[in-house]
């Protein structure tokens, strides 16, 4: 056991801070919650922060001069500052979005606006010019949220969408990226950690490659920010997106990070009140970032809840949480490797993997596996995980994914592996050692 990792006793104390785990702890067979990669459970501190704001301080932020508005705005912007610090950024580099999908679309649609006439009059938007001969690069492993917006942008602008094929184990390398990036590459979008294989991309090196080629780097950080220490300035990416509900926070809140000069030149993809400085019947002028990208009434209580979530994670320590999760992933991968008839998707080398493991069980559909696991009280995700091209590369339609978080126990990991073996027996699948 790593000296840095959270101990079993500390994990037990942490679980006591989560109403979900407390509520189910008295059951004869408490559910093994192994679906944090989709949505994590929330500690009481997050639920309380959002509830307390709604009960005692709810008001319209950035609208009016009353003391109530001032207090609400202070809570809203204070959360922005804490979230920014959590990922090594500055508050003016953090834009609130509905979720990570929305955050990625803000970038893609904003670049589309920059290529539709005068870019809504935003100074410097010409830096986002795209057209025939230009290339947008992604990987075959991307979540649909980091693929479809770029497909649409390519179709709108005439740029070509290129992708880095995955290898047999679903991974790709720095050398693969180096071979794919050309002088025509304008955007390189990729995930920090794959939501199917758990593969950890060498982000800093990839961002440097993009920068050398004159391309923008766009990082899907949904599976990294909740699980490993992330410093976006050190990584050197141009844009990044992550979501609150995967990091102990509320639904309905996501985060877009962008370098200040890039946000300043990006036209807004949605327009309306509070994002503008001047409106006539013929035109509008827009606020500087981040407010330019936050029109309308904001999800204030969710922002406050997300601020509480990063406080909770910071109090635990992301280095200690990551060390603990690494031990769990090692246990998870070892159990799968010892079970004939189960194919692990992604790297078997756990130094290249974080937070999750997806499997294909020979002779069984993932939905049948998932239903059997659910009956055993093991809660996982089944399906294509919004990554159809990657599953197609594996030659399968779907998989069964278990994911861990700082509250996961060794027993829950073992129950998952045991339940997979139970599914094989239940459905009469023959396996050879």
Image (cartoon, rainbow, N blue to C red):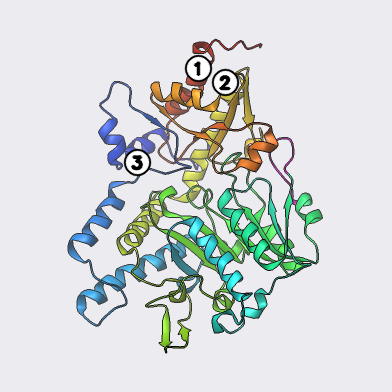
Q: Please tell me which of labels 3 and 1 falls first in the chain.
A: 3
User: What residue does disc 1 label?
Assistant: 423
Q: Nearer the viewer, residue 302 or 101?
A: 101
Q: Please tell me which of labels 3 and 2 falls first in the chain.
A: 3
Query: Residue placed at 42% from the left, 44% from the top?
Result: 39
Q: Nearer the viewer, residue 260 or 335?
A: 260
Identify the secondary structure beneath mark 2: loop
Q: Quadrant of residue 341?
A: top right
- As measured in the structure, the alpha-carbon distance from the residue carrying label 2 to the one carrying label 1 is 9 Å
For the C terminus, the image quarter is: top right
Label number found at residue 364: 2
- As measured in the structure, the alpha-carbon distance from the residue carrying label 3 to the one carrying label 1 is 31 Å
Percent of width and height locating residue 395: 68, 32
Secondary structure, magenta segment, majority class: loop
- As measured in the structure, the alpha-carbon distance from the residue carrying label 3 to the one carrying label 2 is 36 Å
**Is residue 413 part of the magenta span, yes or no?**
no
User: What residue does disc 3 label?
Assistant: 14
Identify the secondary structure beneath mark 3: helix
Percent of width and height locating residue 225: 50, 53
Residue 242 lies left or right of residue 115; in this view the side is left
Q: Which residues are magenta?
A: 166-174
**Picture layout, residue 249 above or below residue 119:** above
């Amino acid at each position: 056991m790593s000296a840095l990792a959270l101990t079993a006793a500390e994990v037990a104390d942490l679980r006591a801070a989560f109403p979900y785990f407390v509520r189910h702890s008295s059951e004869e067979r408490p559910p093994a919650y192994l679906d944090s990669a989709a949505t994590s459970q929330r500690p009481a501190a997050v639920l309380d922060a959002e509830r307390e704001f709604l009960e005692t301080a709810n008001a319209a932020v950035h609208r009016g001069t009353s003391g109530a508005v001032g207090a609400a705005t202070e809570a809203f912007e204070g959360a922005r500052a804490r979230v920014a610090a959590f990922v090594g950024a500055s508050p003016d580099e953090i834009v609130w979005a509905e979720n990570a999908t929305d955050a990625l679309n803000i970038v893609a649609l904003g670049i589309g606006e920059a290529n539709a006439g005068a870019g809504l009059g935003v100074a410097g938007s010409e830096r986002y010019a795209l057209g025939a001969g230009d290339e947008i690069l992604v990987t075959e492993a991307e979540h649909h949220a980091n693929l479809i917006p770029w497909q649409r942008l390519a179709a709108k602008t005439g740029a070509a969408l290129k992708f880095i094929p995955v290898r047999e184990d679903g991974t790709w390398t720095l050398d693969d990226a180096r071979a794919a990036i050309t002088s025509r590459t304008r955007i390189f979008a990729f995930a920090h950690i794959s939501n199917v294989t758990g593969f950890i991309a060498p982000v800093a090196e990839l961002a440097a490659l993009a920068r050398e080629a004159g391309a923008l780097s766009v990082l899907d950080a949904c599976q990294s920010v909740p699980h490993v220490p992330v410093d976006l300035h050190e990584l050197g990416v141009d844009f990044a997106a992550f979501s609150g509900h995967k990091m102990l926070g509320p639904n309905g809140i996501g985060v877009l990070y962008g370098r200040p000069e890039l946000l300043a030149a990006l036209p807004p993809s949605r327009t309306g009140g509070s994002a503008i400085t001047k409106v006539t019947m013929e035109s509008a002028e827009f606020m500087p970032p981040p407010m330019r990208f936050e029109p309308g009434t904001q999800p204030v209580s969710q922002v406050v809840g997300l601020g509480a979530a990063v406080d909770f994670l910071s109090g635990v320590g992301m280095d200690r949480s990551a060390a603990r999760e690494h031990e769990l992933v090692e246990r998870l991968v070892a159990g799968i490797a010892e079970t004939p008839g189960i194919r692990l998707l992604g790297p078997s080398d756990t130094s290249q993997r974080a937070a999750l493991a997806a499997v294909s069980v020979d002779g069984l559909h993932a939905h049948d596996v998932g239903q059997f696991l659910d009956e055993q009280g093991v809660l996982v995700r089944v399906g294509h995980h919004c990554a159809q091209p990657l599953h197609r590369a594996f030659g399968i339609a779907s998989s069964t994914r278990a994911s861990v978080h700082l509250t996961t126990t060794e027993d829950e990991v073992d129950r998952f592996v045991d339940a997979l073996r139970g599914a094989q027996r239940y459905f009469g699948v023959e396996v050879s050692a």
